[in-house]
Image (cartoon, coloured by chain):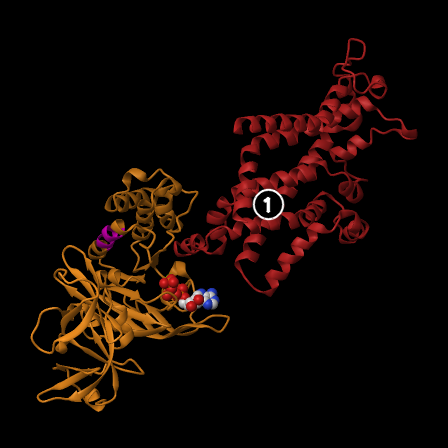
Chain colours: A red, B orange
């Protein structure tokens, strides 16, 4: 009986999995087709005639300046995610452990910031960034820290609440001030949440188009912006190169995810149980 | 030289609750002090103030003649063992024990030597590479002790370290901690709500209730000369029996009148004489009630008998009060039958009916 049920669930999940992977598959498949056939017959496998080999990739790499875009994206993503993890974990620890009106207010501000849609603050934010001189990659990192902080602080706080306070008190007696208590005792315990937060933010920041386009789009190209430049004038699009570049842009995130996959599941569970 | 002095130490929490009320005491070097009392009486709070985990609202705390009110826990030269053990879950046993030494930048080989020495004392050498979650409760307890003893602190603080262990292990660890105290020759301050633990371990016991120290004395004195009815009822197992009665002048000595019965007593004092004819609380230890005797036989109803093998507890209803007597063995009488018993009048305690102060 039970076995039967689990088989059914397995088949169901397999189907869902296929549906989710289908678009990715289409992109990968089309990236090997000659660009003229992509729009005409997007769902057909490449054949002798339509197969283009690596032409699209070579085309795309040269047209988009992919490598410099890759460096820009990598720099922005790594630094932003690093900053988010470092600062929000410390913030979450502080506002969870130090109980007063100010920390309570801060916590609610972070939670509230999660529900504010980006589009709502988009223009004022860009204007503010200009005025403050944040319209460069470093500034963008600060902005990402702001946008990523809400969810990250929320997740870290949930985890900190589950850490018995005695562990930190033991650390204080063992010779740690607050900073060492955090970095030597609390932060290592947060590993599952840290990885979860890192993955969530990496995926979002790596793929983000709108924010970098608005803030630094005229001077720097991240991968999504670079790919967007494949649209020529009058609606002409080099579909082949675009498909190829999309595939390349997915690869790093997939690799990162696979490396951390073991932990993200643990993290979600730990967060769920410890509330 | 690590004596500890508390001068009028109080703790008032942010919500205005006074958890500890002017605690004053000097704990000499090398002594084993036990803080005992019912749940919520402020034992942990007192200990945590000594550790520096809780601020002191009023008064002063000195460790080895140094005022420590504003000194951080890490600089107080103390070690603490928590009820929940509070091991670092992501670190191995070795790292757990070595952690405090590493913080003090001790050379690696010295750390290794000390960790192994501590592990040897506590019989956990074979566990050094394990993580805490792969240990049993008793083993975790030992690691927590190990983490404290490697440091050679001036003072050890224990907050109910044995309450998560099963009864047998608790008895065993009790002995081991007592031995550890002898071996290390350091001041121990030990918190428990279990009076047996307190009586068996402490050189001196501090009984607290409602944030106030009720009596601080040796186990013998607490048992034989409790300062008030609370201490009398808290110390001893099974607990002291209490009866309502009065004191009158008898032929040769004072006499306790309980209901219609008179029990002569050699207990005498100014305070007791001044209460003649007024209601007092009379306390009798279970071992001072026996089923054999000559003077002043009393009659009660036998309710329940408990045979423990080496001794027996006999519950007798007398004047609407349930008395517990400790006897060498159970009687042949059935429950519900009338039974004759004797109270050792000389061992009775008299307490003020209102304040609970010991009058004798
Ligand atoms: N942070 C706090 N704020 C307000 N009241 C507190 C706080 N911490 C403890 N208390 C109160 O102080 C009193 C003493 O607490 P404490 O922890 O010292 O008790 P305890 O004697 O150790 O009891 P137990 O045997 O249950 O551990 C309790 O009534 C408790 O509710
Ligand atoms: Mg306590």
Residue A218 position within the rendered picture, expressed as x and y whole percent measured from the top left: 81, 40
Residue B315, placed above or below residue A32: below
For label 1, the residue is A85
Q: State the image coordinates of residue A25 (x, y, percent, origin top left).
A: 71, 23
Is label 1 in a helix, a strand or a loop?
Answer: helix
Magenta part mainly helix, strand or loop? helix
Relative vertical location of residue A23 with respect to residue B303 in this rendering, above or below:
above
Say which of B251 and A200 sits in front. B251
Magenta span includes B256: no
Q: Which chain is mark 1 on?
A: A
Using the rendered image of the protein, determine whether residue A53 is visible from the camera's viewpoint: yes
Residue placed at 15% from the left, 69% from the top? B339
Note whether ligand 1 is within 8 Å of mark 1.
no
Residue ranking furthest to the left: B294
**For residue B202, what is the image quadrant?**
bottom left
Q: Position of residue B307 (x, y in %)?
A: 18, 57
The correct choice, above or below, for A115 with respect to B9 in the image is above
Assign ligand 1 to one image quadrant: bottom left
* Occupied quadrant, residue B12: bottom left
Give the residues in magenta.
B170-177
Residue at image point 64% right, 40% down: A200
Q: Describe residue A73's horizontal placement relative to residue A263 as left or right.
A: right
């Amino acid at each position: 009986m039970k076995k039967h049920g689990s088989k059914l669930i397995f088949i169901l999940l397999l189907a869902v999995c296929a549906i989710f992977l289908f678009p990715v598959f289409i992109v990968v498949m089309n990236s090997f087709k000659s660009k003229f056939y992509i729009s005409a017959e997007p769902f057909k496998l490449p054949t002798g005639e339509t197969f283009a080999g690596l032409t699209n990739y070579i085309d795309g790499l040269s047209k988009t300046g992919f490598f410099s875009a890759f460096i820009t994206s990598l720099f922005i993503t790594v630094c932003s995610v690093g900053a988010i993890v470092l600062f929000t974990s410390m913030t979450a620890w502080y506002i969870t452990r130090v109980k007063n009106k100010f920390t309570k207010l801060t916590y609610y501000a972070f939670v509230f910031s999660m529900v504010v849609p980006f589009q709502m603050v988009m223009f004022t934010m860009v204007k503010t960034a200009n005025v403050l001189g944040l319209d460069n990659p470093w500034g963008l990192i600060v902005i990402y820290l702001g946008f990523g902080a809400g969810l990250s602080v929320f997740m870290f706080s949930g985890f900190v609440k589950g850490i018995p306070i005695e562990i930190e008190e033991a650390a204080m007696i063992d010779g740690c001030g607050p900073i060492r208590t955090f970095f030597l005792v609390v932060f290592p315990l947060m590993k599952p949440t840290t990885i979860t937060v890192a993955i969530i933010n990496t995926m979002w920041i790596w793929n983000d188009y709108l924010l970098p386009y608005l803030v630094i789009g005229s001077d720097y190209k991240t991968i999504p912006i670079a790919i967007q430049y494949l649209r020529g004038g009058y609606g002409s699009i080099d579909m082949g190169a675009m498909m190829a570049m999309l595939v390349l842009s997915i690869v790093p995130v997939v690799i990162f995810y696979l490396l951390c996959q073991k932990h993200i599941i643990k993290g979600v569970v730990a967060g769920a149980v410890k509330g | 030289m690590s004596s500890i002095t508390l001068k009028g130490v109080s703790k008032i929490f942010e919500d205005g609750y006074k958890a500890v009320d002017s605690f004053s005491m000097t704990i000499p070097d090398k002594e084993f002090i036990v803080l005992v009392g019912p749940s919520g009486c402020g034992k942990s709070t007192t200990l945590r103030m000594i550790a520096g985990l809780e601020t002191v609202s009023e008064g002063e705390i000195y460790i080895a003649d140094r005022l420590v009110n504003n000194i951080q826990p890490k600089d107080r030269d103390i070690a603490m063992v928590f009820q929940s053990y509070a091991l670092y879950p992501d670190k191995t046993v070795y790292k757990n024990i070595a952690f405090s030494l590493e913080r003090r930048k001790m050379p690696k080989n010295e750390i290794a030597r000390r960790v192994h020495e501590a592990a040897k004392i506590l019989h956990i050498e074979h566990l050094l590479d394990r993580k805490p979650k792969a240990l049993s409760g008793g083993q975790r307890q030992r690691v927590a002790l190990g983490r404290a003893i490697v440091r050679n602190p001036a003072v050890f603080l224990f907050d109910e370290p044995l309450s998560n262990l099963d009864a047998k292990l608790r008895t065993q660890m009790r002995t081991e901690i007592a031995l550890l105290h002898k071996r290390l020759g350091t001041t121990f301050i030990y918190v428990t709500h279990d009076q047996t633990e307190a009586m068996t371990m402490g050189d001196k016991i501090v009984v607290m209730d409602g944030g106030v120290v009720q009596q601080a004395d040796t186990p013998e004195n607490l048992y034989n000369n409790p300062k008030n009815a609370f201490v009398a009822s808290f110390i001893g197992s099974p607990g002291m029996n209490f009866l309502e009665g009065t004191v009158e002048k008898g032929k040769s000595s004072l006499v306790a009148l309980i209901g219609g019965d008179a029990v002569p007593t050699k207990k005498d004092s100014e305070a007791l004489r001044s209460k003649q004819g007024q209601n007092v609380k009379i306390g009798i230890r279970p071992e001072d009630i026996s089923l054999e005797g000559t003077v002043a036989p009393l009659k009660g109803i036998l309710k329940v008998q408990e045979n423990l093998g080496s001794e027996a507890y006999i519950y007798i209803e007398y004047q609407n009060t349930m008395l517990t007597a400790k006897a060498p063995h159970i009687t042949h009488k059935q429950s519900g039958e009338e039974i004759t018993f004797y109270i050792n009048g000389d061992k009775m305690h008299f307490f003020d009916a209102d304040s609970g102060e010991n009058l004798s």
